[in-house]
Image (cartoon, helix red, strand yellow):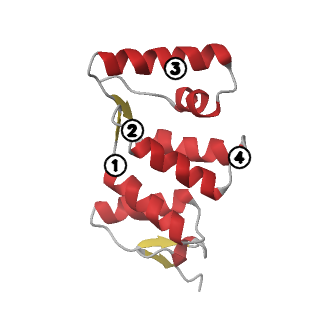
Amino acid sequence: MPALDTNVLVRYIVQDDTAQLAAAKRLISRCVAEGATLFVPVTVVLELEWVLWSSFEFGKEDVLMTLASLFSAAELTFESERALEVALQLFRKGSADFADCLHVALATQAGEQPLWTFDKGAAKVSGAQLLAKT
């Protein structure tokens, strides 16, 4: 199964480079026509979320809608998909950033809790716990 890098997904979503967008669409269309899915590593999703808000100024709602749409795309298969879905729900409900929500979701999926952190925002996520500095 072929895999996608962050930059391919960014071009497909943001559509800011005509040539790269066309190449991304051709690849996805070819894979769909062949009945293949495209694999997306969890690290690509993490980087994608960061690029969308930091470089393209996507707000939280835009990131939520974009990721939810990708997760439901039949032509894509995600590493740790259940943890990604849980992270998206935690992110939707709380004030922690997506990365912290994903860290907690992955730790929970592995059966390892709590996720100890010095980050007060991350500690608000169910499954995380603030580590005292004393």
Q: Which residue is mark 3?
A: 24
Q: Are marks 2 and 4 in contact (CB under 8 Å)?
A: no
In space, the residues marked 2 and 3 are separated at their CA atoms by: 15 Å
User: Which amino acid type is marked by label 4?
Assistant: Ser
129 is higher (above) or lower (below) than 73: below
Foreground tag (1 vs 2): 2
Depth order, front residue of 125/64? 64
Could you tell which of marks 4 and 3 lies nearer the N-terminus?
Answer: 3
In space, the residues marked 3 and 1 are separated at their CA atoms by: 22 Å
User: Which amino acid type is marked by label 1?
Assistant: Glu
Could you tell which of marks 1 and 2 lies nearer the N-terminus?
Answer: 2
Q: Which residue is mark 4?
A: 54
Label 4 SS: helix
Q: Which residue is mark 1?
A: 81
Q: Quadrant of the N terminus?
A: top left
Give how far across and how far down residue 30 sits, in percent: 38, 14
User: Which amino acid type is marked by label 2?
Assistant: Ala
Query: Residue 44, which numbered label?
Result: none
Give how far across and how far down residue 11 sits, in percent: 60, 27
81 is higher (above) or lower (below) than 92: above
- 15 relative to 65 in the view: left or right: right
Could you tell which of marks 1 and 4 lies nearer the N-terminus?
Answer: 4
Could you tell which of marks 3 and 1 lies nearer the N-terminus?
Answer: 3
- 121 relative to 106 in the view: left or right: right
